[in-house]
Image (spheres, rainbow, N blue to C red):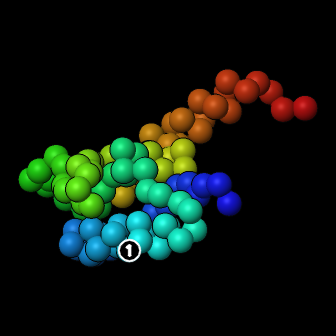
Amino acid sequence: MDYADDVALLAERLETSVAGLLVLQEEAVPLGLQVNWSKTKIQHIGEQSLNQLTLLVAAENIDLVNDFVYLGSLISYNGRSKAEILQGRHRLLKSGPAM
């Protein structure tokens, strides 16, 4: 395997998310993989209440975000993905009529 892409880690607490990212990094190494820290984001689902913009993980600054695109879907801090529905409709309209 040359690379793995689009991994989602779920956790109830920020500290658990950080620990999960460190384990992911550690487990990837024997497989010849590495975490692309510049693409890594941490998103809180719930009330919009970010007290900081970045978090230090494995000596890398990770962005804390309210909205995040995952597998083509825009996920908002409130758990909604209304933008995804609009994007999907736009793609359907753009692709033209079916056969």
x then y, percent, for residue 38 = 36, 44
Residue at figure coordinates x 58%, y 58% from the top left: 4
Check the picture and name the quadrant holding the C terminus: top right
Is 92 placed above or below 31 here? above
Decide if residue 65 is on the left or right side of residue 40: left
Q: Which is nearer the eye, 72 or 82?
A: 72
x then y, percent, for residue 24 = 42, 69
Residue at figure coordinates x 51%, y 36% from the top left: 86
Residue at figure coordinates x 59%, y 30% from the top left: 90
Residue at figure coordinates x 76%, y 24% from the top left: 96
The amino acid on which the numbered mark 1 sits, given as a three-letter code, is Val
- The quarter of the picture where residue 12 lies is bottom left
SS class, disc 1? helix
Q: Which is nearer the eye, 17 or 37?
A: 37
Residue furthest left in the image: 51
x then y, percent, for residue 72 = 54, 44
User: Which residue is tagged 1?
Assistant: 23
Decide if residue 45 is on the left or right side of residue 9: left
- Count of labels shown? 1
Q: Residues within 10 Å of mark 1 (few under 14, many from 20)?
A: few
x then y, percent, for residue 44 = 26, 59
